[in-house]
Image (spheres, rainbow, N blue to C red):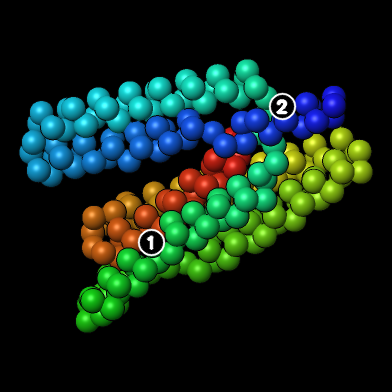
Amino acid sequence: MAQHEAHHHLGEHETSFWPLPVGLGVLIVPISLITYFGWHMQMPSLVLGAVGVLLIIFGLIGWANEVFSKGHEEGLGTLAIAMFISTEVIIFGTMFAAFWAARIGKSDVWKQWVPEINFVIPAILTLILWASSISILLSEKAIERGNKQKSLLFLLITIALGIAFTVIHVQEWIHLWHSGFTLSVNMYGTGFYALTGIHTSHVIVGIIS
């Protein structure tokens, strides 16, 4: 009976309502900005913006209250990971599809848009990512064996590699930007900064979390 109650308690908030208002708010806020700056409709944009912000605040408060009052979510880890990976595929797939559509549509001038690229930097960044994947795996294996010090060491190495990746990437952006290759210079520039920006933002979130 006690085991049944414990299991019920752990699983009672596996399905949460609160991500829904947060997600809707995140969707509505940029729509309000488009309404204001693109369509020049001030009142509808203000209403949409207020609704979006309130939904985000309301959702985050409810979500935080749920976590701190009921504990952590249990039982849907595999499904959550599958959904997370699916959303990542959608995000990057959409960006790559837009990038290649632009390349096909502007194939006659595409080569003129591509700046001179130092391939040593991408190679270094790739090696850093591979190394960080190995170090975080070693950290996980160490904690599974109960070796907390070794796990912490590899975790710190992973964080250091992530910081190095971010710093090198930002320095390369600054160099390209000062050379005239900006976000709005052409479709290649827009696609380049969008793709590398999304990728680097994932690394930064990983460092923080």
Q: Residue placed at 9% from the left, 31% from the top?
A: 42
Q: Residue at x 37, y 55 (%)?
A: 194
Image side of residue 16 versus residue 176, left or right: right
User: Percent x, y for residue 46?
Assistant: 17, 27
Residue drawn at the location 38% of the way across and 62% of the way down: 94
The residue singled out by tag 1 in the image is 95
Give the position of the C terminus as an image quadrant: top right
Mark closer to the chain start, 1 or 2: 2
Q: Which mark is residue 9?
A: 2
Task: Let me know if residue 40 appears in the view.
Answer: yes
Q: Is residue 86 above or below residue 38?
A: below
In depth, the one of 67 and 30 nearer the eye is 67
Q: Vertical placement of 136 versus 2: above or below?
A: below
Q: What number of labels is visible?
A: 2
Residue drawn at 80 percent across, 45 percent down:
139
Q: Residue 96 at what x, y percent from top left?
A: 40, 66
Coordinates of residue 77 in the picture (x, y in percent): 67, 45
* Amino acid beneath label 2: His
Tag nearer the camera, 1 or 2: 2
For the residue carrying disc 2, how many other residues have a C-alpha within 10 Å: few (<14), some (14-19), or many (20+)?
some
Asked which secondary structure carries label 1, the reply is: helix
Compared with 196, 75 (above or below) is above
